[in-house]
Image (tube, grey):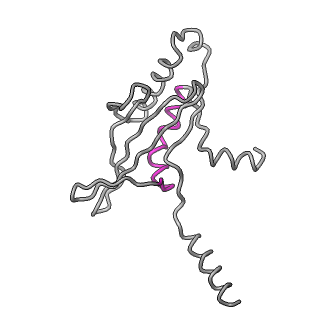
């Protein structure tokens, strides 16, 4: 019995020390302002332009996207840890006309030149990467609605 209690105590202690991780994406809802709604020729083109303007407003340099339905941003360095640095690039894609998904691609770039994808997003890195983007996207009518996990938690709380 003492072993089980000790094991549980160690697990609780270790879980308190673990980093807060979040998914590698954020979702935004497309909100239409009245002036834009009257002048829209093509909703997809208008949303893509909002995305471009939001990224540039937040200080991201646009890059070449793999496909025409995605807006890509060039890599930016966010951390320098001696043996490696953390670089992040972004891709943003309209989803179903009413939503936009921002994909965050963090990489460790080692002093040797090797590059490895980071499979999660630590809370501190997420705040650094996203702090200006949320505001810039909201100015473009893209309201941050979080991730599926945050929306599920809000539903369970009754928000």
- Residue found farthest to the right: 158
Residue 60 to residue 39: above or below: below
Determine which quarter of the picture holds residue 99: top right
Depth check: give the residue in front, 155 or 17.
155
Q: Quadrant of the C terminus?
A: top right
The boundaries of the magenta stretch are: 120-140
Residue 41 to residue 126: above or below: above
**Taking 61 as reference, is 151 left or right?**
right
Q: Residue at coordinates 60% horizontally, 26% vertically from top-left? A: 98
Q: Position of residue 18 (x, y in %)?
A: 53, 67
- Residue found farthest to the front: 67
Membership of 122 in magenta stretch:
yes
Number of marks in picture: 0
Q: Residue at coordinates 54% horizontally, 53% vertically from top-left? A: 22
**Taking 13 as reference, is 118 left or right?**
left
Q: Position of residue 10 (x, y in %)?
A: 59, 80
Q: Mostly what secondary structure, the magenta segment?
A: helix
- Residue found farthest to the bottom: 2
Q: Position of residue 58 (x, y in %)?
A: 43, 35
**Taking 96 as reference, is 59 left or right?**
left
Q: Residue at coordinates 54% horizontally, 60% vertically from top-left? A: 20
- Residue found farthest to the left: 112
Membership of 90 in magenta stretch:
no
Q: Quadrant of the N terminus?
A: bottom right
Residue 116 to residue 25: above or below: below
Q: Residue at coordinates 59% horizontally, 42% vertically from top-left? A: 146
Residue 103 to residue 5: above or below: above
């Amino acid at each position: 019995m003492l072993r089980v209690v000790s094991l549980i105590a160690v697990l609780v202690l270790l879980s308190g020390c673990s980093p807060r991780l979040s998914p590698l994406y954020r979702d935004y809802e497309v909100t239409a302002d009245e002036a834009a709604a009257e002048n829209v020729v093509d909703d997809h083109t208008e949303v893509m332009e909002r995305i471009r303007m939001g990224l540039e407003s937040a200080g991201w340099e646009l890059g070449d996207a793999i496909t025409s339905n995605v807006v890509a941003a060039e890599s930016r360095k966010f951390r320098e840890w001696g043996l490696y640095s953390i670089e992040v690039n972004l891709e943003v894609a309209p989803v179903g006309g009413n939503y936009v998904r921002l994909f965050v691609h963090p990489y460790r770039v080692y002093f040797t030149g090797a590059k490895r994808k980071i499979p999660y997003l630590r809370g501190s890195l997420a705040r650094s990467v996203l702090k200006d983007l949320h505001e810039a996207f909201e100015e473009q009518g893209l309201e941050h609605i979080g991730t599926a996990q945050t929306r599920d938690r809000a539903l369970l709380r009754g928000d």
